[in-house]
Image (spheres, rainbow, N blue to C red):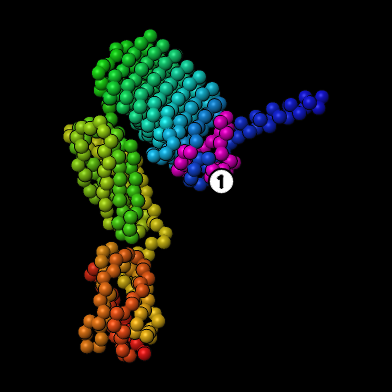
Amino acid sequence: MRFVFGLIWLIFMFESVTAQTTITTTPGSWNTSGNWNNGVPADGGTATVSHNMTLNKNLNINNGNYTVTDAGKITDPSGGTDYNIDVRGTGTFTVSGNVVIGGDLEVRNFGVFTLKGCDTMIVDGDVRFSNFAEVTIESCAVLYINGNLDIRNDNTTQLDGNVVVVGDLTSRNSAVIIGTGNLQTNGEIDIRNSSSIFGSTSPCSPGPCDYGTGSGLPIVLLDFSVSRISCQKIELKWVTGSEVNNDYFTVESSTDGKNFSAIARVNGAGNSSSTINYSYLLEVENELMYFRLTQTDYNGAKEVFDIIALKPQNGLNCHSVLTAKAYPNPGNGNSLTLMVNGLSEGASEIRINDLNGAILYEERISGYGSKELKVNLLHPLKTGIYFLTLINGEKSTSIKYIVVN
C-alpha cells in the first residue's frame, strides 16, 4: 500500500513540475533561473515572455503553452549555436512580440502556432508544419524563412499575413494554405497529393514565386533599432531581407510617441533579394525619444512600421555649461588635476597663460561629458597667478590657477 501511495505522490509531483507556470522578470538568457519568477520553463509548462530573452537552449514546447507578449522578444544571436523551436502534442506557441531564431521551427502532431497581427518571426533555418498542425499567420504579421518551408500530412495553415521563403517550398499529402495573405519564395514551389496554396494546385519553377490574394511585402524589415553612441549622438539601424520597388525610407521622431516629424530621408535599394543594412546618425539630447520608420514605394504607397523608444542613458554627464576645476589650487606649478564637465564632442584645448597673456602651456584633448585630466607641465611655473582656459568648440571657460613654490 505504501508503494501505491508513493507512486501516486510521484505522479502528482511530476504533473506539478510539467504544469509549471513561469513569467519573465528581467531580460537576459533564457536558461537562467533568476530571469523567471518560477524558474526556467519546463517543456510541458506555461511560460510568458515579456522581456528581451536571449535563446541559449532548444525550446521543446511539448503539451505546454508559451506566449511572447507585445513587450517580449526572443533572440538567437548570430555567430553561436543555432537553436530550434519544436511545438508538438497539445503544445501552443503564440507570438505577439518579435522572435528571431538561428535554427529550425517545427510545428507537428496537433501543435498550435499563432503569429499575431503586425508581429514578425525570423527563422534562419528551415520550417516544417506537419501532422494536423494548426498554424495561423494573422493579418500584417510576417514569417520570414531563410531556409526552406515544408508542409505536409493533413495540415492547414491560415495565412492572412505574409510568408517569405528564401529557399524552396514543398507541399505534400493534403497540406493546405488558405486565407487572404500572400506567400513569396525565391526558390521553387512543389505542390502534390491533394495539397493547395490559396486554392492553386499548380507548382512554380523556377522561382521567384508569388501566391495569394493579398499584396506582397514591398520590403521585409528584419530589424529596426536605436542606440546612443555618445552624449549627443545616436545611431538608428535597420535591416531589410528583401525589397520590391522601394523608393526611400523616412525616419521620424517624436517626444511623446504620438506626434511624429520627419527628420531624414534615406534612399532604398529599389529591388533586392539580399540582406541590406541601413544606418543613420542623429544628434539629440539625452532624453526620452521615440522613432519610427516609414517606407515609400515608387508609386507613392507607404508602409509605417512599429515605434521604438530610446530612453535617457544613466551615467552620461551631458551638461550644456562647460565648467572646469583645478586641484590642488594653489599648486606647485609642476602638475595638476583638472576636473571638466560639459564637454561636447570634438577636440578641446587647454591653455595656461600668465597675467600678460603669454601662453605658457597648450594641450589638445578629446572626450565628452565629464573627464578628469592629469596635466604635467614640461616647464615648471614660478610662484604667481595664472589663468587656465579650456576651449571646447564654441564654448570656453577660464579659472585662476595660483602657484606657490
Q: Residue furthest front?
A: 378
Q: Residue furthest left?
A: 298
Please name the predominant secondary structure of the magenta segment in the image: loop
Q: Which residue is mark 1?
A: 34
Q: Which residue lies at the image location 22% right of the left edge and 48% below the top edge? A: 264
Please state the horizontal and vertical placement of residue 387, each as a whole percent of the image.
Answer: 28, 83
**In magenta stretch: residue 34:** yes
Circle 1 residues within 10 Å: few <14, some 14–19, many ≥20: some
Which residue is at the front of the view, 193 or 257?
A: 193
| Residue 278 picture quarter | top left
Q: Which residue lies at the image location 39% right of the left edge and 26% below the top edge? A: 126
* Magenta region: 32-56
Q: Which residue lies at the image location 71% right of the left edge and 29% below the top edge? A: 10
Please state the horizontal and vertical placement of residue 77, each as a whole percent of the image.
Answer: 41, 40
Residue 352 appears in the figure:
yes
Q: Quadrant location of the N terminus?
A: top right
Q: Quadrant location of the C terminus?
A: bottom left
**In magenta stretch: residue 92:** no
Please state the horizontal and vertical placement of residue 86, each as a whole percent of the image.
Answer: 48, 27
> Horizontally, is 261 left or right of 79 in the view?
left
| Residue 177 picture quarter | top left
Q: Which residue lies at the image location 24% right of the left edge and 68% below the top edge? A: 393
* 298 is higher (above) or lower (below) than 363: above
Q: Amino acid at mark 1?
A: Gly
